[in-house]
Image: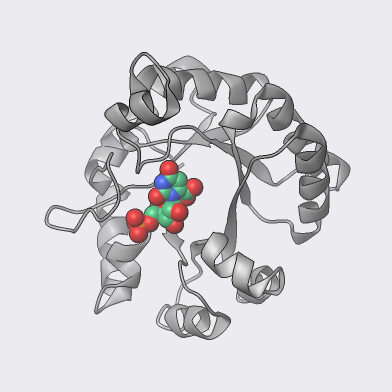
Amino acid sequence: MRQVIIALDFPTLDKTLQFLSQFEQKLFVKIGMELYLQNGPEIIQRVKALGHQIFLDLKLHDIPNTVYGACKGLAQFKVDLLTVHAAGGEKMLAAAKQGMLDGGSPETKIIAITQLTSTSQEQMQEEQGITGTLEQSVERYALLAKNAQLDGVVCSVHEAQRIHQLCGEDFLTVTPGIRREGDQTGDQQRVATPSLAKALGSNYIVVGRPISQSENPEQAYQDFVKNFN
Ligand SMILES: O=C(O)c1cc(=O)[nH]c(=O)n1[C@@H]1O[C@H](COP(=O)(O)O)[C@@H](O)[C@H]1O
């Protein structure tokens, strides 16, 4: 299964609706911190009502009991994907899953963030004090997520193949940091093209600025779809 997810990194509901109005088809969209924290849960309902699939990217990271409660509450929105940070540990990851189940949304897939695509190996070693390679750290986090019965991970395209080998083909890889040749990378460190994402077995690519900042977002979106599918 392969799908392009568009990151709705906008500050307001108005800007979001204006952006979405340029598309005729139903999309898979990501509501992240910028949009959710300024507009609250209503934003989920408004975007969902338009028929789009929702990836709620809140990157939860707290003690297991708190994450359990958050996920139990978020279950009411029946989103398709939700993120939590693998760095919270296996107990926290399992608590997230349990919260979602107890809240009544077994269909919501919980995905663990491994190493952000804006992190380089050098930065990881120096700032997080993690020795070993970036790939090893991502693999370790993926195994934690797998052991906690989560549905997959967020990683860069460069780690997707290895994660499927380790955790199985059904274990989802959601990969941001996607750029076409010539696109600006911005703050992303571990980038890849949509064609490489396809070749390395990524399940979902997450694309923000190359679509949202484009003069013709619909055409840019089609470009990503064509090269990934
Ligand atoms: O969880 C995410 O979606 C995420 C994880 C990660 O490691 N890297 C990453 O870029 N993202 C998100 O993916 C999107 C990428 O946006 P662009 O860099 O504009 O394409 C942003 O909304 C990020 O929040």
Residue 200, image x and y in percent? 30, 31
Out of 182 and 172, give the one closest to the viewer. Answer: 182
Out of 37 and 167, give the one closest to the viewer. Answer: 37
Q: Is residue 45 above or below residue 101?
A: below
Q: Is residue 50 visible?
A: yes
Dividing the picture into quarters, in which one does residue 165 lie? top left
Q: Is residue 68 above or below residue 211?
A: above
Q: Is residue 137 above or below residue 189?
A: above
Name the residue rendered at 44%, 61% in the picture.
Answer: 7
Name the residue rendered at 19%, 54% in the picture.
Answer: 180
Name the residue rendered at 78%, 49% in the picture.
Answer: 70
Q: Is residue 123 above or below residue 132?
A: below
On screen, residue 104 versus residue 123, left or right, reads right
Out of 217 and 93, give the one closest to the viewer. Answer: 93
Dividing the picture into quarters, in which one does residue 52 lie? bottom right
Out of 88 and 229, give the one closest to the viewer. Answer: 88
Residue furthest left in the image: 182
Residue 62, image x and y in percent? 70, 39
- For the rendered model, the colour scheme is one colour
On screen, residue 110 versus residue 124, left or right, reads right
Name the residue rendered at 82%, 36% in the picture.
Answer: 65
